[in-house]
């Protein structure tokens, strides 16, 4: 299954993922997965049974940062004549 990361705590290697059908559930990663960030599209599998059932991320399908160009285009369409300027954080 795939879903979008709602939040992730790297130190604990746990977070919340929103599935394709809109359900939100806790997930864990075993640390082999590269750094996960909010709004990343991830692939996961279910582990455990019954009330112990959790999602475990297996790989990152798409990073949120890769969609920045489409966000810029959308903002340009929404706000028309505004100039969008990117700056680096210090």
Image (cartoon, rainbow, N blue to C red):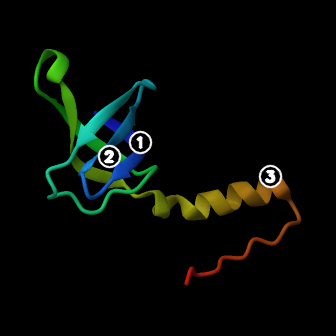
For label 3, the crowd category at 10 Å Cα-Cα, with few meaning under 14, some 14 to 19 and many 20 or more, is: few
| Disc number lying in front (3 or 1) | 1
Q: Quadrant of the C terminus?
A: bottom right
Residue at horizontal 52 percent and vertical 59 percent from the top: 67
Establish if 18 lies above or below 81: above
Q: Which residue is mark 2?
A: 42
**Secondary structure of the residue carrying numbered label 1:** strand
- Relative placement, left or right, of 78 versus 31 is right
Which is nearer the N-term, disc 3 or disc 1?
A: 1
Q: Which residue is mark 1?
A: 4
Nearer-the-camera pick, 79 or 25: 25
3D distance between C-alphas at marks 1 and 2: 6 Å
Residue at horizontal 66 percent and vertical 76 percent from the top: 86
Q: Which residue is mark 3?
A: 78
Most distant residue in the bottom direction: 90
Contact check, label 1 and label 2, Cβ < 8 Å: yes
**Secondary structure of the residue carrying numbered label 3:** helix
Q: Quadrant of the N terminus?
A: top left
Q: Locate residue 12, reporting x and y percent.
A: 24, 52
Q: Locate residue 42, reporting x and y percent.
A: 32, 46
Residue at horizontal 16 percent and vertical 57 percent from the top: 31
């Amino acid at each position: 299954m795939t879903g979008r990361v709602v939040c992730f705590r790297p130190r604990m290697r746990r977070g919340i993922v929103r599935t394709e059908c809109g359900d939100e559930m806790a997930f864990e990663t075993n640390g082999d997965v590269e750094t996960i960030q909010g709004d990343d599209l991830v692939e996961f599998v279910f582990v455990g049974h019954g009330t112990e059932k959790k999602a475990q991320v297996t790989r990152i399908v798409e990073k949120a940062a890769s969609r920045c160009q489409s966000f810029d285009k959308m903002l340009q369409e929404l706000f028309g004549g505004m100039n969008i300027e990117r700056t680096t954080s210090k």
